Amino acid sequence: QQQVKQSPQSLIVQKGGISIINCAYENTAFDYFPWYQQFPGKGPALLIAIRPDVSEKKEGRFTISFNKSAKQFSLHIMDSQPGDSATYFCAASASGTYKYIFGTGTRLKVLA
Amino acid sequence: DAMVIQNPRYQVTQFGKPVTLSCSQTLNHNVMYWYQQKSSQAPKLLFHYYDKDFNNEADTPDNFQSRRPNTSFCFLDIRSPGLGDAAMYLCATSRDFTTGTQEFGPGTRLTVT
């Protein structure tokens, strides 16, 4: 019940295309869902995050879609660029707890 | 800019030789975390401090210890590094347990020879 399942494991997208990464969870106590971007040899950087009171959040080319009833959330990267090539981790946490439950990560490669 | 700083960025140690990694933060956050990340894996939480209160994850080996002498600094001590401890070690902070957001440092890449 504590798991967050992330797919796909790897993704190759053409420049200008849309990258879509999906995550699913079981624990209904989760109320914070961040996405992190990590480049090789660097620490994860917060990209965008959402709480269950909204179904979508957009920041620039990055959008989180959230489906509370299905217990799923996804990251959409519009107009994907080679500079977006990185590993993306979704995570989930519950207010009042300290722990992130991370997905297994998606390695994105955007072809020039 | 407020940030999380880790030193050194790269550390090479010998098998069995104690090593200390450091983390500092200018965010004035109450919570500091240490994660271990191996290649192609998600970060794995080792322990965290809420102020001075220390919490060890159940599966964190005894070989790993931590100290937080003040709000700004936190240290990870590996008493007798083994080859399996070679990894990226990430420090993160959060204001508390309600805001959700964790800010990560750049990491320290540990190599054990």
Image: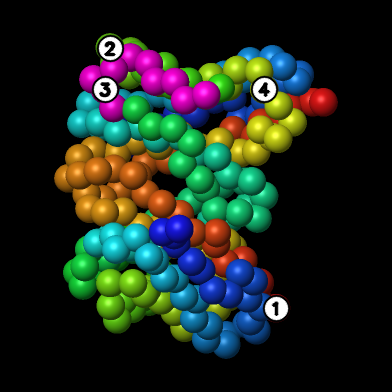
Q: Main secondary structure of the magenta part?
A: loop
Q: Is residue A17 above or below residue A102?
A: above
Magenta segment, which residues? A51-60
Q: Is residue A46 above or below residue B86?
A: above
User: What's the mark number on residue A52?
Assistant: 3
Left or right of residue B77, residue B97 in this image: left
Q: Quadrant of residue B95?
A: bottom left
x and y percent of residue B87 in the render? 59, 63
Mark 2–mark 3 distance (CA, rounded to whole Å) = 10 Å
Which residue does the numbered mark 2 point to in the structure image? A69
Q: Residue at x 56, y 22 (%)?
A: A61
Callout 3: SS: loop
Q: Which residue type does callout 1 highlight? A: Thr
Near-viewer residue (A13 or A7): A13
Question: What's the chain of the residue with tag 1?
Answer: B
Mark 1–mark 2 distance (CA, rounded to whole Å) = 50 Å
Same chain for mark 2 and mark 3? The answer is yes
Q: Is residue A10 above or below residue A53?
A: below
* Visible residue check, residue B85: yes
Q: Which residue type does callout 3 highlight? A: Pro
Callout 4: SS: loop
Left or right of residue B75, residue A7 in this image: right
Question: Of marks 4 and 3, which one's residue comes earlier in the chain?
Answer: 3
Q: Which residue type does callout 4 highlight? A: Ser
Same chain for mark 1 and mark 4? The answer is no
Single out the mark in the foreground, 2 or 4.
4
**Quadrant location, the C terminus of chain A:** top right
Which residue does the numbered mark 1 point to in the structure image? B113
